[in-house]
Image (cartoon, helix red, strand yellow):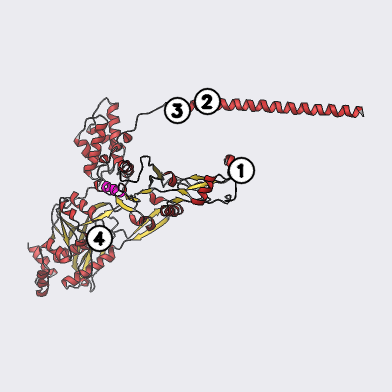
Amino acid sequence: MNRLFLILTIVQILFSCIAAIYFYRSLREKGSIKTLSQLEFKKEQEELKRMRGIHLTTPLSEQTRPKTLNDVIGQKEGIKALRTALCGPNPQHVLIYGPPGVGKTAAARLILEEAKRNPISPFGSKAKFVELDATTLRFDERSIADPLIGSVHDPIYQGAGVYGTAGIPQPKAGAVSQAHGGILFIDEIGELHPIQMNKLLKVLEDRIARFESAYYSENNRNIPNYIHDIFCNGMPADFRLVGATTRSPEEIPPALRSRCMEIYFDGLKKDSVIEIAKNTIERAGFDTAVNICKKIANYASNGRETVNIVQSAMSLAILEGRHCIEQEDLEWVLESGRYQALPVKTISKKQRVGVVNGLAVYGSGTSGMLLTLEAYVQKAKNETGTLTVTGIIEQETFQNRQGESKRKSNARASVENVLTALEQLTGLSIKQYDIHINFTGGIPVDGPSAGIAIFCAVYSALYHVKIDNKIAMTGEVSIYGDVLPVGGVCAKIEAAKEAGVKKVLIPADNWQNQFSEIGIEVKPIHTISEALKELFDITKEKQEEKIHKKEYTLTEGILTAEKG
């Protein structure tokens, strides 16, 4: 018995020694790991500190970034509209349309700062400006991660921590809650995923971000009260949305557009680019050369391009020991950067038969351009005349994150509509003639807004009378000769002014009092007859009299022109 007890005692002592050795080694290993971890952490901290101590010079683009709203060049009307939408006692959600590099983001930031200084504004002094880019915004459809709306970190996910061990789901605030009381700015909002777009619309409606989790139970006493509150009542998300996009309004979901005030930032005019180039050169401490700034404006279409060109030219000058940009510097930058001169559309130098100045918009509908239309008419070679329309893009395809969409041009249908109106006015049978209409430039033409230009071009070719080359026009034409309203009139008038036009004919329903101070004559018209009077000094009565007496047919018009 004593012997058995002695053996058990020896075995127990051996096991105790083995356990002691095991725990001793474990403690040493932990101490070693802790020491190594501390050394590694210290090394990483020192590396981070070293990196923070390295600074390059401030980029010129940052130096020239607008500091006040007066520094946002070329967007007077857009700034006024943005101030109206956000600086009052009841700020609105906003959509800003415009090409890249024209100041949309900078203007939104500065507007918030102005609103915070306004005593009647609900934006507090600590209101945040939270900025996101929809093109890089990613989310998990299982709601594991959603930087826009917010997400729930359930206990099963890695890194749930102490709350996860206790089986507690953790709501994580998204940008909509981070922007609570301020502005949420989403750049390229048109690229937002449809699921996120729908969630965002719900937040805009309720001003609350709501969360769900299969691990949440209102009877779980381990869950803190604030988490109960979030799951039951949602997380506050009372902000104002400012969405910027380079897309056209038609490409933005109607549900979002209906909740927002829509504001348009124009593409920069040549004078604005010159001013930006001048300011950039002056802020860098270089001597300003007017001819340099003017040449830059022939190649740069927005602020970013302007600053990039200036910075490259300045760097070249500095490397050669100069503090002024010379013509050779700029030419080298333009050549090495493969910059292409911007197309400059101007009116023709003389009046011509069948050639008329139409007006169109492009991009997001904020930029206008001169559109030259040509028409040629001759007696039909066969019993039935032909209609040929060239220069139009019949169908456009748009790619976006929502998929692919197509839009067909109705320019040809608009031409046929105009020819019916021409028959109504002249009493001639258009089928007796071969008609060729050409839209120069090969750009997408929607059609209806070019109706009046098509009519006047065909009329000019039909009667062989020249059209005033200093007049441009826009408007839809009904089959009974009425001139109907169209969109983008302001942008079209600006484009006409830049092209050297002296008078613009627009639908009377598009008239605004501000057009009287725009710098060129803007004439509102109701009917095609009024347009003919402006172009050819032909009243409806005179035209009907000539047609009735057959004093001025197509053949006679051509013969008269040849004799002249």
Mark 4 near mark 2, Cβ–Cβ under 8 Å? Answer: no
Q: Element under label 4?
A: loop
| Disc number placed over residue 43 in the picture, else none | 2
Residue 289 at x, y = what percent?
20, 33
User: Which one is in front, 416 or 261?
Assistant: 261
Magenta residues, as a range?
Answer: 78-85
Q: Is residue 138 visible?
A: yes
Mark 3 near mark 2, Cβ–Cβ under 8 Å? Answer: no
Counting residues from the start of the chain, the first of labels 1 and 3 encountered is: 3
Q: Element under label 2?
A: helix
Label 1 sits on residue: 166
User: Which one is in front, 130 or 562?
Assistant: 130
Counting residues from the start of the chain, the first of labels 1 and 4 encountered is: 1
Q: Is residue 515 left or right of residue 391?
A: left
User: Which one is in front, 1 or 367?
Assistant: 1
Measured Cα–Cα span from mark 3 to mark 4: 57 Å
Q: Quadrant of residue 492?
A: bottom left
Q: Is residue 272 above or below residue 259?
A: above
Q: The disc labelled 3 sits on which kind of residue?
A: Met
Q: Is residue 419 above or below residue 82?
A: below
| Disc number placed over residue 249 in the picture, else none | none
Classify the position of the C terminus by image quarter.
bottom left
| Disc number placed over residue 51 in the picture, else none | 3
Counting residues from the start of the chain, the first of labels 4 and 2 encountered is: 2
Q: The disc labelled 1 sits on which kind of residue?
A: Ala
Measured Cα–Cα span from mark 1 to mark 3: 39 Å
| Disc number placed over residue 486 in the picture, else none | 4
Residue 215 at x, y = what percent?
58, 49
Q: Is residue 369 visible?
A: no
Q: Is residue 28 left or right of residue 101?
A: right
Does the magenta portion include 337? no
